[in-house]
Image: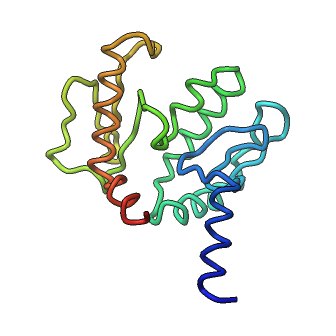
Amino acid sequence: MSGQHVNAAWQARLRAVPIAPALTLTTQGLVLGAGTVLVAATAPRRLSSLQGREARVLALLASAYGKPIAPSVLGVIERAAEAWRQGDDCLGAALFPYSRFHIPWIAYLGPSLITEAVRPPDIKTERTPDGGLLMSATEDRLDPANPGHLRAARVIAETIIGCTGYQKARAARA
């Protein structure tokens, strides 16, 4: 098969199966990319236990993101799964990094992405014990009709883009 055929097949796959750069909770479980199930669902809105699967999940995430993933992410996954199990789709989704199609109201940047210059204005921030940065648009439930909440969410998105170079990486692929 020639390189052109491989490229054409890949482009067809991209059009047929959406590739999500963010973790998503679905009926299949915790999903990333083109449907890779990191943690299977055992019942509606219930993920399998992470116990005994920690190394696998961290290895899959490290492979997807191209760098080591802090074990503290497992706690984030567990908290999101519990919120999702209780019917809170917003909290369950918000604990994960968002794709370019969402506006984050809460986000975490790992220590490797943080410089002393990262001090987003007009949002609540907190340094984590591992040296990362937790950012929140509000301490209340996000209200999409509240311009202040949306303004703060945009600052978070711009901070993430600035620290990760996400737009540059996307443009280089095109």
Image point (67%, 48%), residue name: 31
Image point (54%, 61%), residue name: 64
Image point (77%, 47%), residue name: 40
Nearer to us in this view, 16 or 73: 16
Determine the residue located farthest toward the bottom in the rendered image.
2
Vertical side of 98 occupied by 114: above or below:
below
Determine the residue located farthest toward the left in the rendered image.
117
Compared across the picture, whether 151 is left or right of 119 comes to right
Residue 156, position as x, y percentages in the image: 32, 34
Which quarter of the rendered picture does the N terminus lie within?
bottom right
Image point (43%, 10%), residue name: 145
Vertical side of 37 occupied by 80: above or below:
above
- Which of the colour schemes (rainbow, by chain, secondary structure, one colour) is used? rainbow
Nearer to us in this view, 8 or 144: 8
Q: For residue 103, what is the image quadrant?
A: top left
Compared across the picture, whether 113 is left or right of 77 comes to left
Which quarter of the rendered picture does the C terminus lie within?
bottom left
Residue 133, position as x, y percentages in the image: 31, 40
Compared across the picture, whether 172 is left or right of 117 comes to right
Vertical side of 43 occupied by 87: above or below:
above
Residue 59, position as x, y percentages in the image: 58, 64
Nearer to us in this view, 140 or 73: 140
